[in-house]
Image (tube, coloured by chain):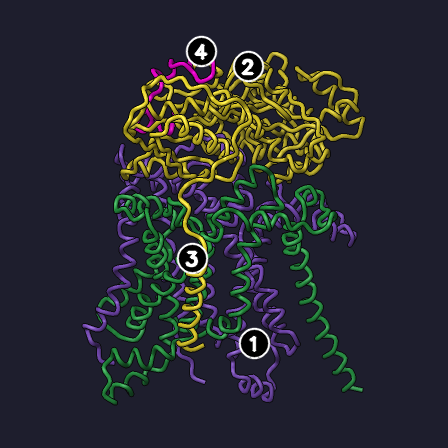
């Protein structure tokens, strides 16, 4: 191909490009979301609307096309309609925003509003980047009679993470809870009439399921081994002892009665693991649940939305808390939970207006919209619907919130490199409880520095 | 050729400047950071660590094991890739029809986006439910092979290696094939007439003439394997068994991606200083390997 | 008798060759074919191993292709790729020529710097450059990503082209200079036309790389107006991931893959014949 052909090729491509260009001008205004069919949001002007135009920059962790993105857009539209002088400039960063946020602020980018995991906001970003909201939370919420914002939200979620300076940095608006999701039709078939609350009840239920021909459980060994290990450990040994064991190089923890009981119970449970569980790569495990190949799977309340297409509208979703262990530290009212939260940055010029927007996000209307797209709501009075309806009363009765996988990831390399593979072996029936305990003790002595 | 200093400068300077513009600041920034403990990329809150970051890394079991892993990938994977590439080039040059077609077939896996390839292998080929391997091995009566849990943590490293080699063969086949085809046919015929056997011809004539092709291929394979990141990440990102140095660096620099597909979980504590140190180590290794390979494959103009 | 035995052996070995190649092709059909078939199926079918059981579903493709702004992202990607390829050629060609065919003090060092550039983990440079470019205000337009692409492709391009230039006979410039041409003219009029093949190959490599590039495009472009096709599609895929629409995800992946495939098919011959020209004697 000679030079002339190369030039021709490039010219053609550029001509093609300009043809496309002439056909579509860049759109900078976001497409309006569908209007809600509920009654319009009541406006309680708590901050006197300022006359001069205000622009708020909002970096969102959502994508414009996903359901939560559309809900956020709905909130933005509602807010802008009620406050014509305020424009919210949203950039749909997607999940990678967590990597860019602090670097952007440090390089001088002006961001007013940011949303992300409440734990990350409080502990990774903290007082340096995020405004404390304690004084704002006492403002009246939107659409309630006299309740403050703080009063409308589950206290467990609101107070779960505080910054080093002791302030609440974000308002939870998209929570999750981990539970055992199960197929109600299978339970009925097998004659299991009540959800298990203790380990014994659970094993009895599993036996019935086995007799009815249903493998009891599975999980995605690459993605969720952490909560299988950490959240079960919470019931037996508690998160504190668990975290200590992850960093104890004497390996003594693995001989204590609570740990032994944990291993033995998980060994008993492994009899009911679906074949091939150890080889599941996300999303094979949860798809298996949706297809009816297994009865139960432990996961967060986002999961049913992820398998809605496979499960279909007829799938009867149920949920129960991880059953308690006899003499164990945790109770069935302790939950691994968390939330995405909205926060205001320290570099904002308009904290009052920004918080006004946050109030819209946690208003009843928007939170109902959140539940309509399959997620849980952070407002106590907004019920969770559809597949996660069972989880709503559980959430209201929750007494303790603990972090993802009992905080295992933050303890160091030992958790992912040593515990998780060995635990998978245990819970899929490849090794016995004794082998598990011995191996863990060995590995602790060798690998923990 | 007479060296015209002005021309050399004019020709070289723009490229050098452009390249330095995007590398000088990050490299200097990173190198400085590697001597500190840093919790944010902006470099605020830095604690001087001296060489501690490097020492910690070199004593870190995960980091050092990751080098063993890519060592295995380099050796065994390299054997698989190059062995297959040579074999295929022999097959393709044995006078069959449809050479272009088969060449395209072998190269295609190299073009498949990493995400698609990983999904294809983990969700279909290796699947325990309806997987290709399970069905084929089962049909052939090789029940033991059919029952292997390829993507379980004990086997997943080898599963990934197989998948990665499959995807890599095509690129090196192209290079080697083109090199083989450049060997003058008359040479081979003359050798045959002189009574040389196939092996003798291959070892004594073809291989030496391919020396430069092989050298470039080995350099590219080495650099690719050293920086291996995307494929193991897509394959089984949380499995320690497929952790490569580049993945470990990513984890240090951007926080662990624990917590399932929704991103809940680890608060993502970031060790920027140590990540920078890992980056420095990796860069040094690349330069060393390049130098080593240049020595092993000494440039020679062959007369024939 | 002997001749027939020879013929038989020849026929057998050819059959074996075809068999091996045929099996390999079959494997490709079944494996990649799964991705292709999945993009036309439903998610349920993908995970039960019953692809296309309910016929061919085009809706996945339709929904991806009619996504807002897709044409805009396509235009943006074209702009980035074309301009970057051009920029790389302009910068790398003279530099690699000089590095490979002239001799001057510091040549080895500069070559070494470019080689080291290929080894620097990109991850380490991302955030520092992100911060630097933010401060310089380069994130708000096409410029930021263009600079990254052009400058980032220089090490490999120089490596590749140097190899090619080294393989050309040295007498060429001398002949031209004896005829009265300046060194620059010798470069422009004689070397450049000879290098066309390598330049085309390099441009194809670079184009494919830029087209499929994701990480830099993600952080260097904050504004939707300048987003690339890869990012646009990945965003769609990510949204579908959260709703478990795997059939849609695969159709998105195929859409991303098609330009790459088309480019390869059209230029395969050129790449193959020119890859050795650049590869040998680096």
Question: Which sits earlier in the primary sequence, circle 3 or circle 4?
Answer: 3
The part of the chain drawn in magenta is A122-149
Q: Chain of mark 1?
A: B
Residue A43 image offset from top left, x and y in percent: 42, 19
| C10 relative position to C81: left or right | right
* Crowd tier of the residue under label 2, counting other residues whose Cα lies within 10 Å: few below 14, some 14–19, many 20 or above: some
The residue wearing badge 2 is A398
Residue A138 falls within the magenta-colored stretch: yes
Chain B drawn colour: purple
Q: What is the x, y in percent for residue B280?
A: 34, 48
- Subunit of label 4: A
Say if B110 sits above or below A32 in the image. below
Which color was chain A given?
yellow
Circles 2, 4 touching at the beta carbon (< 8 Å): no
Q: Nearer the viewer, mark 3 or mark 4?
A: 3
Q: State which quadrant residue A61 falls in.
A: top left
Eyeballing the image, is A280 above or below A209? below
The numbered mark, 3 or 2, whose residue comes first in the sequence reads 3
Per the image, the residue denoted by label 3 is: A22
- The chain coloured green is C
Residues indicated by labels 1 and 2 sit on the same polypeptide chain: no
């Amino acid at each position: 191909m000679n030079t002339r052909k190369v030039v021709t090729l490039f010219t053609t491509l550029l001509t093609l490009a300009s043809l496309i260009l002439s056909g579509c001008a860049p759109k900078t205004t976001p497409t309006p979301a569908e209007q809600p069919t509920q009654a319009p949001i009541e406006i309680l002007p708590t901050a006197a609307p300022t006359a001069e135009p205000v622009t708020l920059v909002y970096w969102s962790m959502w994508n414009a096309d996903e359901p939560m993105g559309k809900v956020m857009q709905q909130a933005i539209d509602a807010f802008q309609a009620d406050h014509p002088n305020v424009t919210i400039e949203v950039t749909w960063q997607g999940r990678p925003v967590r990597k860019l946020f602090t670097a952007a602020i440090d390089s001088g980018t002006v961001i007013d509003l940011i949303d992300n995991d409440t734990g990350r906001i409080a502990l990774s970003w903290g007082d340096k980047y995020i405004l404390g909201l304690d004084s704002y939370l006492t403002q009246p919420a939107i659409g309630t009679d006299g309740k403050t914002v703080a009063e409308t939200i589950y206290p467990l979620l609101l107070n779960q993470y505080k910054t080093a300076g002791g302030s609440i940095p974000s308002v939870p608006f998209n929570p999750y809870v981990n539970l055992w999701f199960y197929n109600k039709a299978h339970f009925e078939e097998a004659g299991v009439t009540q959800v298990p609350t203790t380990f014994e009840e659970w094993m009895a239920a599993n036996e019935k399921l086995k007799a009815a021909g249903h493998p009891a459980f599975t999980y995605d060994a690459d993605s969720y081994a952490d909560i299988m290990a950490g959240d079960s450990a919470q019931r037996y040994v508690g998160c504190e002892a668990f975290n200590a064991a992850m960093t104890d190089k004497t390996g003594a923890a693995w001989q204590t009665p609570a740990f032994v009981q944990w291993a033995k119970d998980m060994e008993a449970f492994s009899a009911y693991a679906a074949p091939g569980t150890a080889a599941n790569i996300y999303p094979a495990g949860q798809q298996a649940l949706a297809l009816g190949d297994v009865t139960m799977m432990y996961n967060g309340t986002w999961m049913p939305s992820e398998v809605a297409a496979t499960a279909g509208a007829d799938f009867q979703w149920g949920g129960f808390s991880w059953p308690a262990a006899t003499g164990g530290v945790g109770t069935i009212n302790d939950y691994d939970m968390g939330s995405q939260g909205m926060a205001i940055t320290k570099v904002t010029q308009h904290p009052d207006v920004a918080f006004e927007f946050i109030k819209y996000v946690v208003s009843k209307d928007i939170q109902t919209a959140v539940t309509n797209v399959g997620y849980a709501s952070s407002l106590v009075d907004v019920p969770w619907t559809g597949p996660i309806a069972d989880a709503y009363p559980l959430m209201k009765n929750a007494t303790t919130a603990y972090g993802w996988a009992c905080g295992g990831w933050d303890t160091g390399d030992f958790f992912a490199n040593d515990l998780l593979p060995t635990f998978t072996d245990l819970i899929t029936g490849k090794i016995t409880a004794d082998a598990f305990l011995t191996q863990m003790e060995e590995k602790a002595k060798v690998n923990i520095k | 050729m007479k060296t015209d200093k002005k021309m050399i400068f004019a020709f070289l300077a723009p490229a050098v400047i452009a390249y330095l513009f995007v590398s000088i600041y990050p490299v200097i920034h990173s190198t400085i950071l590697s001597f500190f403990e840093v919790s944010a990329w902006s470099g605020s809150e830095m604690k001087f660590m001296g060489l501690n970051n490097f020492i910690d890394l070199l004593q870190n079991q995960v980091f050092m094991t990751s080098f063993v892993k890519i060592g295995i990938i380099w050796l065994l994977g390299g054997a698989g890739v190059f062995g297959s590439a040579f074999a295929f080039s022999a097959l393709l040059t044995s006078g069959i029809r449809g050479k272009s077609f088969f060449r395209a077939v072998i190269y295609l896996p190299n073009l498949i986006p990493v995400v698609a390839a990983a999904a294809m292998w983990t969700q279909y080929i290796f699947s325990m439910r309806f997987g290709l391997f399970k069905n084929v091995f089962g049909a052939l009566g090789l029940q033991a092979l059919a029952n292997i849990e390829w993507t379980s943590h004990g086997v997943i490293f080898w599963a990934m290696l197989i998948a990665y080699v499959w995807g890599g063969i095509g690129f090196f086949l192209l290079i080697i094939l083109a090199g083989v085809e450049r060997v003058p046919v008359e040479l081979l015929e003359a050798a045959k007439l002189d009574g040389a056997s196939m092996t003798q011809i291959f070892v004594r004539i073809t291989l030496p003439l391919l020396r430069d092709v092989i050298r470039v291929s080995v350099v590219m394979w080495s650099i690719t394997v050293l920086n291996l990141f995307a494929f193991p990440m897509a394959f089984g990102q949380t499995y320690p068994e497929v952790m490569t140095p580049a993945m470990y660096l990513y984890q240090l620099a951007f926080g662990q991606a624990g917590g399932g597909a929704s991103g809940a979980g680890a608060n993502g504590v970031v060790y920027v200083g140590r990540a920078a140190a890992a980056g420095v180590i990796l860069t040094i290794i690349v330069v060393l390997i390049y130098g080593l390979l240049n020595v092993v494959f000494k440039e020679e103009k062959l007369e024939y | 008798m002997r001749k027939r035995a020879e013929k038989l052996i020849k026929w057998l070995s050819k059959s074996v060759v075809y068999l091996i190649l045929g099996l390999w092709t079959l494997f490709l059909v079944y494996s990649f074919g799964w991705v292709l078939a999945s993009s036309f199926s439903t998610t349920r079918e993908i995970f039960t191993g019953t692809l296309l059981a309910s016929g061919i579903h085009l809706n996945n493709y339709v929904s991806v292709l009619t996504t807002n702004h897709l044409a805009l992202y396509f235009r943006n990607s074209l702009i980035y790729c074309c301009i970057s390829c051009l920029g790389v050629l302009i910068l790398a060609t003279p530099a690699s020529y000089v590095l490979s065919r002239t001799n001057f003090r510091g040549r080895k060092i500069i070559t070494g710097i470019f080689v080291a550039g290929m080894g620097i983990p990109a991850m380490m440079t991302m955030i520092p450059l992100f911060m630097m470019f933010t401060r310089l205000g380069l994130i708000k337009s096409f410029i930021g990503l263009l600079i990254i692409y052009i400058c980032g492709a220089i090490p490999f391009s120089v490596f590749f082209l140097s190899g090619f230039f080294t393989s050309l006979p040295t007498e060429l410039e001398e002949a031209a200079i004896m005829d009265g041409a300046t060194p620059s003219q010798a470069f422009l009029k004689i070397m450049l036309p000879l290098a066309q093949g390598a330049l085309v190959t390099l441009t194809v490599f670079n184009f494919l790389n830029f087209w499929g590039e994701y990480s830099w495009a993600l952080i260097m472009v904050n504004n939707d107006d300048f987003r690339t096709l890869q990012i646009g599609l990945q965003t769609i895929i990510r949204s579908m991931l959260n709703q478990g629409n795997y059939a849609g995800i695969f159709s998105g992946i195929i859409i991303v893959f098609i330009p790459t495939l088309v480019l390869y098919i059209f230029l395969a011959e050129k790449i193959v014949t020119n890859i050795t020209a650049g590869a040998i004697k680096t």
